[in-house]
Amino acid sequence: MNRNLINFLTTLLLAISFSFFLPWWSVMVAAILTAIVVPLKKSAVFFVPFFTIAIFWIGYSFLLGKDNDFILAKKVANLLSLGGNHYLLLLVTGVIGGLAAGIAGVFGKQLKSFSNTTEQ
């Protein structure tokens, strides 16, 4: 299997598992652990966790909101000056989660390279 796909699936499974008992930052822990175990190269270190968590958060937010016709999401979108557009709020949510996970993925890669440097 491709390393990107393995990293994607591992990050997704860890994020879903951790979200049951940890707060929102559990996606960062999932991205760090996955970056250490399944290292990626170049820009994939940022973008694979970014898209993984962005898709996860957008999908999960959609599932939570569709049951009540996005009533709360529309109100929050009004508060954030998004014109009540709940789909735009879902996109913003995904980007914020994706940025957190992408930065955590880069941090995990740096931890892995730092630990390899100190062992020599």
Image (tube, rainbow, N blue to C red):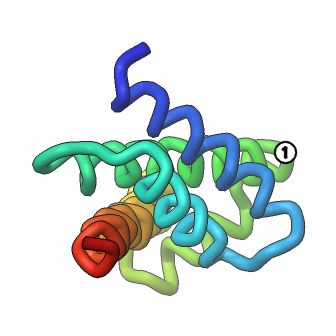
Q: Is residue 12 left or right of residue 60?
A: left
Q: Residue furthest left?
A: 42
Task: Give the mark count.
Answer: 1
Give amino acid for label 1. Asp
Q: Position of residue 84 (x, y in %)?
A: 49, 66
The residue under the point 37% across, 62% down is 105
Residue drawn where x is 49% and y is 50% of the image: 37
Residue 63, quarter of picture: top right
Query: Who is closer to the viewer here, 72 or 11?
Result: 11
Query: In this view of the protein, can residue 99 be seen by the observer?
Result: no
Name which residue lies at 77% across and 62% down: 19
Would residue 42 appear left or right of 44 to someone viewing this image?
left
| Side of 107 relative to 31 (left or right) | left
Seen from the viewer's position, the closer of residues 48 and 36 is 36
Residue drawn at the location 11% of the way across and 48% of the way down:
42
Q: Which residue is mark 1?
A: 67
Q: Give 49 or 117, whichever is nearer the viewer.
A: 117
Where does the C terminus fall, quadrant-wise? bottom left
**Placement of 25 over or under 59, stated as above or below:** below
